[in-house]
């Protein structure tokens, strides 16, 4: 195993200006100069992209920018000890010790464990003091090497029992036991630093705390008995918690992973307050503290998160159902809509003397009918699943049943996906409101499984039946009639708008709104009303353009793209063909003002052409691989090709002739020499 750090990767007592980007660029240059990465630009861009997610400054005058990058050849640490500290976003001020952790995309577990151990060592004041006092690069290397030397203890095990004596002492005096989960997007540094900070704060307070680190270096789950005995849970995470259901029924403090580093003692106290408060307000098993990530969201953010959660859980029903319906048409012909029930229930075609046209033909029609009915039944869950999981996003598990019921009522009344959205929001709000009630402890266990589902179902579904269902059904019928009547210019304009939205943020909120609009309408599609299928085809075709265009652009003019971008371009071919718009994000992150406009132009043209040519798709995802579910597939492919070519040549032209002129300042010289 190569040394993680060498003297040539250390910059001592240097002045790198006042911007984090300048420091990161300089350290990236050291790594490339040491032959441990292929190019500065790709590594620098990946590190800045990670920095944009969460600032990497931590208390104590430290910063740990880090990333995974295709430009990195082996796990590497570079260190800058700055004579002029730089603000990396820590609450206690700028950093004078900056560690740049660079890991390759396919880093092995042993290397990742070493990097994680280094990150945890940064929480020790004696270690950072020794780094500040070191007189040479060689001394720095010796200090780092000493703390990352392999030890026969797994990362998960280390956190599973942070301090046996502290735990015993805590138990002896009856102190509440706490558990925690830490996780960050990269899983290299913040995950483990937050865990150690929480463990240290708990030890200082005499609290028994056990932590599960969900990072890149592996995962050792907490013992179920430990979770069962815990009075409260701390989630210091920036990503979804794996196995969240294990903590159901526990008061939970939600916080960003960086808060676990910056304010561990405060998180411990909040968890203790939740565990000891018999009237702690639970929202579907989640404590409403006002400090949590969910509680701090603006109304618009909460609404967007709820809607997108509903759509994401609904998509599997639509995807499976849409593809099965397409297979039913493929095998049984378009008459399958009229005969499917009779064929499936009575096997009527197979009972004919000649087996239909012939034995194979009759059997094909039978299979087509079976596939069509399974697909139609699956599609029938579209509105209930949408409503159920919108409610779930607002109120957690207690909201699922009321949401599904409200969605079923919306479907019964013909209110469609609009009714499902309204019903899901109603069910979620009512469920969450009842979850906040202060009830006796003996009644609390009945709240999420009996009382909340019962009351919320009555209120939400009752309002749908008595007040809201009929008006929403009328609005839905009007909308369907408008969509079905779209021809000519109106259809083209809609396709153009949807295409622009799909490329605007490449998988972000605007993209998701356009996609959700297309998917939600599929439940109303039929042979007589093919407009929703046309919208789905336009959205999918437009969403395929950005990654395909960037892949083509790297072939047209390689010199305009960095090594990392050219490597990403190879993968973008498959991502684009699979309808994964996010394949263009690495290009946009490095050059947003030239890549995004080019992608929007190409995607808008594709969406407009798809609508103009009447292309339809019964599948909501899959790209080229669901060709059998796309009518007029050749025109579908042609629209994508045209949009891809336009976007690719546009971005190449912008890169050639619209040159960015960065501001020249005192830091520029450092950038040029890095």
Image (cartoon, rainbow, N blue to C red):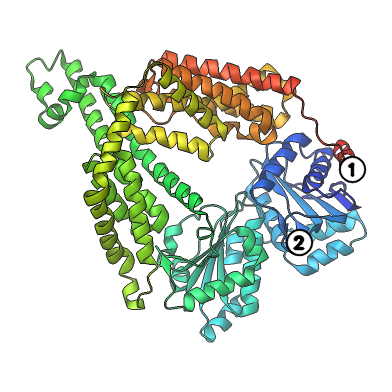
In the image, what residue occupies the spot 24% across and 29% down? Answer: 372
Give the x, y percent position of residue 148.
Answer: 74, 58
Question: Residue 636, how many percent across, how many down?
Answer: 44, 17
Q: Nearer the viewer, residue 264 or 610?
A: 610
The local secondary structure at tag 2 comes to: helix
Residue at 93% x, 60% y is 135
- Residue drawn where x is 64% and y is 17% of the image: 649
Q: Which mark is residue 454?
A: none
Q: Residue furthest left?
A: 353
Q: Residue shown at 37%/28% (left/top)?
A: 619
Percent position of residue 176, x then y: 51, 78
* Left or right of residue 496, residue 482 in this image: left
Number of numbered discs overlaid on the protein picture: 2
What mark, if any, has residue 666 been given in the picture? 1
The quarter holding residue 381 reads top left
Asked if residue 513 is positioned above or below residue 426 in the image, the reply reads above
Residue 497 can be seen in this image? yes
């Amino acid at each position: 195993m190569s040394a993680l750090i060498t003297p040539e990767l250390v910059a001592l007592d240097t002045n790198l200006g006042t911007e984090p980007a300048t420091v990161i660029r300089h350290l990236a240059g050291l790594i490339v100069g040491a032959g441990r990465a292929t190019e500065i630009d790709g590594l620098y861009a990946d590190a800045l992209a990670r920095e944009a997610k969460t600032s990497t400054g931590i208390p104590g005058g430290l910063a740990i920018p880090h990333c995974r990058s295709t430009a990195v050849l082996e796990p590497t640490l570079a260190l800058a000890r700055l004579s002029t500290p730089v603000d990396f976003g820590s609450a206690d001020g700028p950093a004078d010790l900056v560690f740049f952790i660079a890991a390759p995309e396919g880093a092995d577990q042993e290397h990742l464990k070493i990097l994680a151990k280094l990150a945890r060592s940064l929480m020790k004041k004696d270690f950072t003091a020794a780094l500040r006092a070191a007189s040479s690069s060689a001394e720095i290397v010796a200090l780092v090497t000493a703390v990352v030397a392999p030890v026969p203890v797994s990362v998960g095990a280390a956190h599973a029992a942070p301090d046996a004596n502290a735990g015993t002492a805590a138990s002896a005096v009856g102190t509440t036991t706490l558990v925690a989960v830490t996780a960050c997007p990269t899983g290299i540094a913040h995950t483990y630093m937050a865990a150690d900070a929480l463990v240290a704060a708990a030890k200082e307070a005499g609290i028994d705390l056990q932590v599960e680190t969900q990072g890149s270096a592996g995962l050792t789950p907490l013992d179920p008995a430990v979770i069962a005995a815990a009075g409260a849970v701390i989630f210091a995470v920036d990503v979804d918690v794996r196995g969240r259901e294990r903590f159901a029924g526990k008061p939970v403090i939600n916080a960003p992973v960086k808060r676990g580093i910056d304010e561990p003692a405060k998180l411990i106290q909040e968890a203790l307050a939740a565990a000891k408060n018999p009237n702690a307000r639970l929202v579907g098993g989640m404590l409403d503290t006002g400090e949590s990530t969910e509680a701090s969201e603006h109304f618009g953010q909460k609404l967007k998160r709820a809607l997108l959660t509903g759509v994401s859980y609904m998509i599997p029903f639509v995807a499976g159902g849409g593809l099965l319906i397409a297979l039913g048409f493929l095998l049984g012909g378009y008459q399958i809509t009229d005969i499917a029930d009779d064929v499936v229930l009575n096997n009527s075609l197979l009972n004919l003397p000649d087996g239909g046209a012939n034995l194979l033909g009759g059997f094909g029609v039978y299979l087509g009918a079976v596939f069509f009915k399974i697909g139609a039944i699956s599609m029938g869950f579209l509105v209930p699943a949408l409503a159920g999981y919108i409610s779930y996003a607002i109120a957690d598990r207690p909201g699922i049943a009321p949401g599904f019921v409200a969605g079923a009522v919306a479907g019964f009344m013909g209110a469609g996906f609009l009714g499902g959205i309204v019903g899901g929001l109603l069910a979620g709000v009512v469920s969450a409101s009842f979850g906040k009630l202060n009830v006796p402890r003996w009644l609390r266990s009945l709240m999420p499984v009996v009382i909340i589902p019962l009351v919320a179902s009555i209120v939400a579904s009752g309002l749908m039946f008595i007040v809201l269902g009929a008006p929403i059904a009328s609005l839905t019928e009007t909308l369907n009639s408008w969509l079905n009547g779209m021809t000519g210019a109106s259809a083209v304009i809609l396709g153009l708008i949807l295409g622009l939205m799909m490329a605007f943020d490449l998988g972000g909120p605007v993209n998701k709104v356009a996609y959700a609009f297309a998917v939600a309408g599929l439940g109303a599609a039929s042979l007589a009303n093919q407009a929703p299928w046309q919208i789905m085809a336009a959205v999918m075709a437009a969403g395929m353009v950005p990654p395909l265009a960037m892949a083509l652009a790297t072939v047209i003019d390689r010199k305009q793209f960095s090594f990392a971008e050219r490597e990403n371009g190879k993968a973008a071919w498959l991502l684009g063909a699979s309808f994964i718009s996010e394949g263009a994000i690495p290009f946009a992150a490095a050059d947003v003002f030239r890549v995004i406009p080019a992608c929007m132009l190409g995607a808008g043209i594709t969406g407009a052409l798809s609508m103009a040519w009447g292309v339809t798709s019964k599948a909501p995802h899959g790209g080229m691989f669901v060709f059998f579910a796309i009518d007029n597939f050749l025109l579908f492919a042609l629209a994508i090709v045209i949009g891809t070519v336009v976007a690719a040549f546009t971005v190449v032209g912008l890169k050639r002739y619209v040159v960015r002129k960065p501001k020249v300042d005192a830091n520029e010289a450092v950038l040029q020499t890095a």
